[in-house]
Structure formats: C-alpha cells, structure tokens
Amino acid sequence: MNKLIITSMMLILAGCAATESSQDRIPANKTHEAKLAPERVYFNGMSNELATDALLVSLMNKNYMVKKIAPTSVGVQLGNHQFVLQPSLNPNGIDRILASRYYSVSPKLQGSQDLMAMLLTLNDKLNFAKFTLRENGKVIQVQGAATFVDTLELEELRRFLIWTDDALEAVGKAIPANAYEFIKPLPVMPISQTN
C-alpha cells in the first residue's frame, strides 16, 4: 500500500516540474506601488541574531502573526500555513532569508526507502525548494531561500512566500488524497499566538 502511494506520488510529481515565477503569479499594481513605499528591513552590519530580531519587529509592525521560536528563527503565519524564517547574512556577498515548512511523517513511512526515493525525485524534478528528512526520518523539511543584499523588502518576502506556498499547493494537489494520512503539515507556533 505504502509503495503504491509513494510510486503514484513520484509519477504525478514528475509532471509538476515547472513552476511559475512570482512575477507571473502576482501582477504588480503600479499605481498602488507608487503611493506606498515598500517596507524595508536594513540588515547591514548585523549578526544573524540581530537580523532575526529586526525581521520579527518589522513583520509585527506589518501585522503578521509571528513568534520568535529560536535565536535565529521567526515563525510566521501566511494564510493557512506557517513558515520558519531564518536570516543568513554574509557581510561579503549575498544575504538570504531561509524559509522552511515542516511536515510530520507517519511511523508507517519513517525509514522507508520509498519515502527517500520520493524526496530524491522531488529534489530532482522541482527547483523551488529542497526537500530533506530531519529528526531520524520523522519530519520532512521543505526549504527555499530568498536572496538580497543588506536590505530586504517585506513585499518581496511576502511574494516569495506566496510563490513557495503556491508551488507546495501544486505538489499537494498531485498527491493522492490518502497520502495525507502519512504526511501532514507540522505547526511551528500556535495559530492564535503572536510574539
């Protein structure tokens, strides 16, 4: 049964290799953008810990549901989904915000060669994120990265998260419905809680 589900998922996901860019998905409203200056977070000279605090405060000021969940990690609610955001600053190059989503794996699939094969297929066929097993196969981490230099525009981050979310939704639609018994979204913070 598990082998059939994993095999079906791999075959269907092979057809989902192409994803649209966020520019194609979210048309810009030039008139609206001209009236509202984008909210920016300036990270120049900060450590990852200070950048995490600056990101947290900026997201709170824009009314995002957020919570600091580790010294260098912020949980954020976007629609019905949660991401973990981690600044990764490089004083001599390109900075990144790592954005991760987590999924719990049923004990029936933990350690399964079929699950490993599915993740290898996803990493081979899709380019929007990296799929990795964590915690001895109990958790799947899906991680992408938004790049910038010193200054991050929150609108660009929001568009990146929406693009990632849309891509994961497309993958989810390709998965047979009974697969959700084996792989489920893992919350990183209570939905009702803000920092």
Image: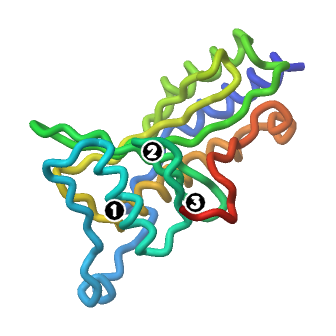
Comparing labels 2 and 3, the label whose residue is closer to the camera: 2
Comparing labels 2 and 1, the label whose residue is closer to the camera: 2
Comparing labels 1 and 3, the label whose residue is closer to the camera: 3
Q: Earlier in the sequence, mark 1 or mark 3?
A: 3
Q: CA distance from mark 2 to mark 1?
A: 19 Å
Left or right of 130, for residue 31: left
Residue at disc 2, secondary structure:
strand
The kind of residue on which mark 3 rests is: Gln
User: Residue 89: horizontal and vertical position, in percent?
Assistant: 24, 41
The kind of residue on which mark 1 rests is: Glu
Callout 1: few (<14), some (14-19), or many (20+) C-alpha neighbours within 10 Å? some
Q: Identify the image quadrant of residue 180.
A: top right
Q: Nearer the viewer, residue 11 or 31?
A: 31
Does 50 appear above or below 162? above
- Give the residue displayed 81% in from the left and 30% down from the top: 182
Residue at disc 3, secondary structure:
strand
Mark number, residue 73: 2
Q: Which residue is mark 3?
A: 77
Q: CA distance from mark 1 to mark 3?
A: 16 Å
